[in-house]
Amino acid sequence: MVDPKDAPIIYIIGPNYFQNELLASFLKKEVGLECRHNTALNPTALIDPSGSQQYLLLLDCAEGEGIELLKTPEVETVLRIPQCLLVFFNVDPRKEEEGELVRHRVRGAFYRSDPPRMLVKGVVAILEGELWYSRKILSKFLLREKSIDAPAPGPARDAGTFLTPREREVLLWVAAGESNQAIADKLAISLHTVKTHIYRIFKKIQVPNRFQAALWAAKYLDA
């Protein structure tokens, strides 16, 4: 059980005060975490000297393009704070900005047409360490990264020589955006076994999280 003082705090950030107040109240009721709302992003208020407080920031991009928001000093600062998980909501799918959001380590994107329950499901998944993008978006991004030979962390050697067949299979599902439970169901193994595989994979390829593991897989593994 999470100690209340260490529980993540959710911030809804955007100019629509009334919308954000309702959204904060809804998420607090559904997720059971403290939810606050601000009209502007203030990175200095999110720097915790102890390094233990985690924040999930839902940034409203209804009145501007996500790509432009990524270029603001406030967002650039937040992306450098390890305890901050940045998510965009009210994303316009017609602008096809998700690839750039993934590249800049934005943890997820919610569309303007997404129902409230989808938001709850996504917030819970992100807090559990997952990315919240469709498999189609992640696959498109990974294929693009492979095609341009993007830099990736970890040892530059043949993955087949140090990942077992099962580890390779698990890594491919991680790169596809699947949750630990979904991987366990697909491979007919226990959740504990999946977690053990992922721990060993991260250690072998020298990455700290699923996002970096996905980048590594895009460069060194063939689908």
Image (cartoon, helix red, strand yellow):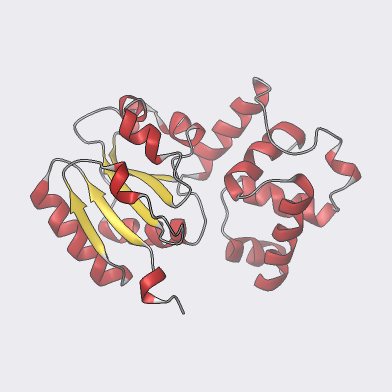
**Furthest-right residue in this view:** 161
Q: Position of residue 7 (x, y in %)?
A: 39, 68
Residue 136 visible in the snapshot: yes
* Image position of 84 (left or right of 154): left
Q: Residue at x 67, y 65 (%)?
A: 195
Position of the C terminus, as image quadrant, is: top right
The answer to whether residue 96 is above or below residue 26 is: above
* Image position of 25 (left or right of 199): left
Q: Residue at x 84, y 52 (%)?
A: 165
Query: How many numbered marks appear?
Result: 0
In terms of depth relative to the viewer, which is nearer, 117 or 21? Answer: 21
Q: Position of residue 70 (x, y in %)?
A: 36, 29
Q: Residue at x 31, y 29 (%)?
A: 69
In the rendered image, which quarter is residue 178 located in?
A: bottom right
In terms of depth relative to the viewer, which is nearer, 101 or 7? Answer: 7
The answer to whether residue 189 is above or below residue 18 is: below
* Image position of 134 (left or right of 39): right
Q: Residue at x 86, y 36 (%)?
A: 158
The answer to whether residue 79 is above or below residue 164 is: above
In the rendered image, which quarter is residue 93 located in?
A: top left
In the rendered image, which quarter is residue 98 located in?
A: top left
Residue 111 visible in the snapshot: no
Q: Position of residue 149 (x, y in %)?
A: 68, 22
**Furthest-front residue in this view:** 49
**Furthest-top residue in this view:** 148
**Furthest-left residue in this view:** 18
Q: Position of residue 34 (x, y in %)?
A: 27, 66
